[in-house]
Image: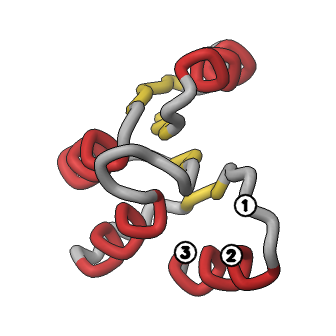
Amino acid sequence: MKILIVEDDKILSDTIKQCICNKFDTEQAYDGYEAYMLAKENIYDAIILDLMLPEMSGYDVLIKLRDEKVFTPVLILTAKDTLNDKLKGFRLRS
């Protein structure tokens, strides 16, 4: 399986990678635009996506991917915790 990790905090991104790299092939993106381009041009089995990213928010990445019929499963990883944030993320995932 190939996983795209999208997290602007490089230490956190590397930690996630270390936790899963023994079982999955991983690639990392550190901003929303880079994540969008990688996800649009490559096939991933899943995307771990932060919402608060430079260049383009995680929400915007997800909207653009879904608009372009990229339906890779997405696990949203974020510090946002309001009900509205959670509902918005769930609506965009599918």
State whether residue 72 is above or below residue 71: above
Amino acid identity at mark 3: Arg
What percent of the width, then of the height, locates residue 45?
A: 49, 48
Q: Which of marks 2 and 3 is in front?
A: 2
Which labelled disc corresponds to residue 80?
1
User: What residue appears at the point 27 percent right and 40 percent down from the top-left corner?
Assistant: 34
Q: Mark 3 points at which residue?
A: 93
Q: How many residues crowd around disc 1 within 10 Å: few (fewer than 14), some, or many (20 or more)?
A: few
Among numbered discs 1 and 2, the one appearing first in the sequence: 1
Amino acid identity at mark 2: Asp
Amino acid identity at mark 1: Lys
Q: Mark 2 points at which residue?
A: 85
Looking at the rendered structure, the secondary structure element under dot 1 is: loop
* Marks 1 and 3, how far apart at CA: 16 Å
In the image, 28: left or right of 1?
A: left
Looking at the rendered structure, the secondary structure element under dot 2 is: helix
**Badge 1 vs badge 2, beta-carbon distance below 8 Å:** yes
Among numbered discs 2 and 3, the one appearing first in the sequence: 2
Among numbered discs 1 and 3, the one appearing first in the sequence: 1
* Marks 2 and 3, how far apart at CA: 12 Å
